[in-house]
């Protein structure tokens, strides 16, 4: 894990090597109990429960107790705008919530040197997405955008759609673990057309085949260990998607699908299919050099924990 | 040079730190998850760092350094003229450690990549870091992810 993090974030390897963190990263705190005595600590393997006790474990429910204290974050984002060479910024998995993300959004227009922005796991939510869009629009050099696990549904993606369409340099877009079934899939389909450079699209855990109301959280959200790195698993669904004619049939066979709800999924399948090079059949992709070559569609079961 | 076993704070760790002092051509040093926890090993490492004039990348991730460890290292860090990458992921810095680190950061203008993922920064830690960041004029990559695993991190509302 450490090596991976080092690889994906070393300044030289910029965006292409971006590897998503584990979908539900558990404590990466060192597996060593703090041993103040200074005696020979055996290489303990048990993680100390210490750090986890406060219920800081990602809960499915948004915390809405006292207002967030964003003073530290405000200073931080102000400082970020004074870094002239900043290309990669990872603020992921901080569960900032709408208030914190609002602060980040205010700084974005001044972070125009950014090529990679990772804000996964921050509970942005549909409403706050509206305020986020104008800032995003300014990041014209962005190659990689990780918006995974942010409670974004069709409404949120609708707000972001115009901004995303401006990011024509985008090569990697990570939208996994957002409830994008239905409307979200349709909005995404429309957006893909304006992203000619896009080669990596992650939609893992988006419950794309789910058509009912947002699913109940299932079992503490640990279901996602197969997570968002399923490059190999992606081939199968992508192959289906690459044949628009069969898209409907594929969706039909998907669990829990109502025929009336297939349309957005089908549209997404077509949008992807018109670009995908994963399909090795006769369908000739239009622009081989810029087409999606990595598509992740793993974990679409509707029972996964999601905002 | 990749060292990836649990050095701990025993004799091996001490010997290695002392040996480092003569490794003047070392360019990358990875000591991730090597059980460097007590004050002594970070101190020895901190003392060895000024000899590593060619060091470009230092990875100390997943060692429970804490504020004391950060303090021990800080003095050495500022004397690494070639250092461009510093990885302190999961080093349990907390705000106090961030303060120690921030004191070093203001003199580390060549740094290009700084990883402070999962270091349990609070509001204060974010603030002291913010004060130091503008000194890092060459910084290209900054990772402040996964700092939520505390009761109140630098942005999130307190959890019930």
Image (tube, coloured by chain):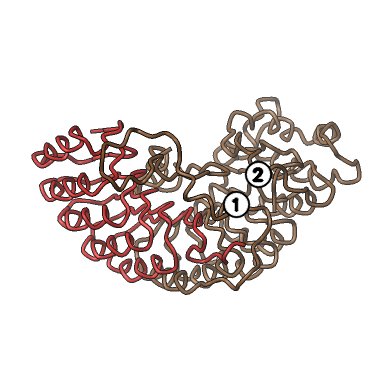
* Horizontal arrangement in the rendering, residue A252 relative to residue A125 (left or right): right
Q: Residue at x 29, y 49 (%)?
A: B85
Q: Quadrant of the C terminus of chain A?
A: bottom right
* Chain B image colour: red
Left or right placement of residue A50 versus residue A297 in this view:
left
Is the residue A294 above or below the residue A103 in the image? above
Which quadrant of the figure has residue A28?
top left
Residue position for label 2: A221
In the depicted view, which residue is nearer to us: A56 or B55? A56
Going from the N terminus, do you reach mark 2 or mark 1 first?
1
Percent x, y of residue B12: 19, 32
Element assignment for label 2: helix
The answer to whether dots 2 and 1 both sit on one chain is yes
Circle 1 marks a residue in which chain? A
Find residue A209 and report its image quarter: top right
**Residue contact between numbered discs 2 and 1, judged by CB atoms under 8 Å:** yes
Mark drawn on residue A58? 1
Q: Secondary structure at mark 1?
A: loop
Q: Residues within 10 Å of mark 2 (few under 14, many from 20)?
A: some
Chain identifier, colour brown? A
The extreme left residue here reads B22
């Amino acid at each position: 894990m450490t090596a991976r993090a080092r690889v994906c974030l070393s300044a030289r390897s910029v965006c292409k090597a971006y590897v998503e963190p584990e979908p539900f990263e558990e404590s990466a705190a060192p597996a060593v109990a703090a041993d103040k005595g200074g005696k020979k600590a055996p290489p303990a393997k048990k993680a100390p429960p210490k750090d986890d006790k406060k219920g800081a474990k990602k809960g499915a429910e948004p915390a809405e107790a006292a207002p967030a204290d964003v003073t530290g974050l405000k200073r931080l984002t102000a400082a970020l705008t004074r870094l002239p060479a900043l290309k990669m910024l990872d603020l992921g998995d901080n569960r900032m919530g709408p208030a914190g993300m609002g602060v980040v959004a205010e700084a974005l227009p001044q972070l125009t040197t950014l090529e990679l922005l990772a804000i996964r796991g921050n509970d942005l939510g549909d409403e706050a997405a509206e305020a986020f869009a104008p800032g995003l629009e300014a990041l014209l050099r962005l190659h990689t955008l990780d918006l995974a696990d942010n409670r974004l549904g069709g409404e949120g993606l609708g707000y972001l759609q115009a901004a995303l369409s401006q990011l024509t340099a985008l090569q990697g877009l990570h939208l996994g673990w957002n409830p994008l079934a239905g409307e979200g899939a349709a909005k995404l389909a429309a957006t893909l057309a304006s992203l000619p450079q896009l080669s990596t699209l992650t939609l893992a855990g988006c419950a794309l085949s789910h058509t009912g109301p947002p699913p109940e959280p299932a079992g503490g959200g640990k279901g996602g260990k197969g997570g968002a790195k399923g490059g190999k698993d992606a081939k199968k669904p992508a192959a289906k998607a690459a044949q628009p004619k069969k898209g409907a049939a594929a969706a039909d066979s998907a669990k829990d699908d109502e025929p009336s709800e297939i349309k957005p999924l089908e549209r997404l399948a077509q949008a992807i299919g018109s670009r995908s090079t994963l399909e090795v059949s006769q369908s000739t992709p239009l622009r081989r050099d810029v087409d999606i070559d990595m598509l992740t569609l793993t974990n679409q079961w509707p029972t996964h924990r999601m905002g | 040079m990749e060292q990836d076993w649990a050095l701990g704070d025993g004799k091996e760790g001490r010997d290695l730190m002392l040996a480092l002092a003569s490794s003047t051509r070392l360019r990358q040093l990875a000591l991730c998850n090597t059980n460097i926890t007590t004050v002594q090993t970070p101190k020895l490492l901190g003392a060895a760092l000024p000899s590593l004039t060619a060091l470009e990348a230092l990875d100390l991730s997943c060692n429970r350094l804490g504020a004391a460890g950060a303090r021990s290292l800080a003095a050495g860090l500022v004397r690494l003229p070639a250092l461009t990458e510093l990885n302190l992921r999961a080093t349990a810095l907390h705000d106090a450690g961030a303060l120690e680190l921030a004191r070093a950061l203001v003199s580390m203008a060549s740094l290009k990549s700084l990883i402070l993922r999962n270091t349990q920064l609070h509001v204060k830690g974010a603030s002291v870091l913010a004060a130091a960041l503008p000194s890092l004029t060459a910084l290209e990559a900054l990772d402040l992810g996964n700092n939520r695993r505390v009761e109140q991190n630098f942005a999130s509302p307190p959890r019930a």
